Amino acid sequence: MRLPPLLLSTLLLATGLAACDPQRIEKLEEGLSTEADVRKQFGDPATVTEKADGSKLMAYPRQPEGDTNYLITIGADGKMSSLRQLLTPANFARVQPGQSQTEVRALLGPPAKTHQYALKPDEEIWDWRFRDGQARKVFSVTFGPDRAVLRSAIGDDPREAYPGG
């Protein structure tokens, strides 16, 4: 299968950005780095949420092709107070039946993929790609007709089992 040049360059850029993240993170220090330092290393965030206390949540998702989603908090003092990778076993365990899509997105960041199955049109599945050691995995959350979590599961990334398709 031959990819169109624009799609290929986009995939290479996304993969390259994710590969550089450890070097970017290494240049930042909680309590010392400023928002300008974060933007210099990571660029503009996908979203910025301003909190009532004056802090900001800056989202740097690496989905759909990457296997991380970062959330960087800038305190009211303008300094980075935390840099977290959201796609972790601890966060997956926090996803519970009954939670809303908004709550799940706040825990994990935007999904790599959303889909529905024809035989279950009232359900929607969100997938996040992540790594478990060297293994590529997918964390899936199924939402019911009320857009609340029904269940979640972890499986192998189908791109590993069926490369190219």
Image (spheres, helix red, strand yellow):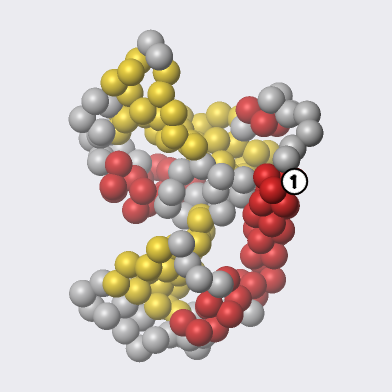
In the rendered image, the residue lying farthest to the top is 119
- Amino acid of disc 1: Pro
Q: In the picture provided, is 28 more to the left or to the right than 119?
A: right
Location of residue 161 by image quarter: top right
- In this orientation, which residue lies closer to the viewer: 81 or 14? 14
Q: For the C terminus, which image quadrant?
A: top right
In the rendered image, the residue lying farthest to the right is 2
- In this orientation, which residue lies closer to the viewer: 13 or 31? 13
Mark 1, Cα crowd under 10 Å, few <14 / some 14-19 / many 20+, is few
- The answer to whether 17 is drawn above or below residue 64 in the figure is below
Where residue 6 appears, x then y in whole percent? 69, 48
Residue drawn at the location 53% of the way across and 77% of the way down: 39
Where residue 124 appears, x then y in whole percent? 36, 28
Residue drawn at the location 33% of the way across and 18% of the way down: 121
Where residue 10 appears, x then y in whole percent? 67, 51
- Residue 95 in sight from this viewpoint: yes
Question: Total number of numbered labels?
Answer: 1
- Residue 15 in sight from this viewpoint: no
Residue under label 1: 5
Q: In the picture provided, is 34 more to the left or to the right than 48?
A: right
Where residue 57 appears, x then y in whole percent? 37, 69
- The answer to whether 80 is drawn above or below residue 159 in the figure is below
Describe the element under mark 1 as helix, strand or loop: helix
Residue drawn at the location 73% of the way across and 40% of the way down: 4
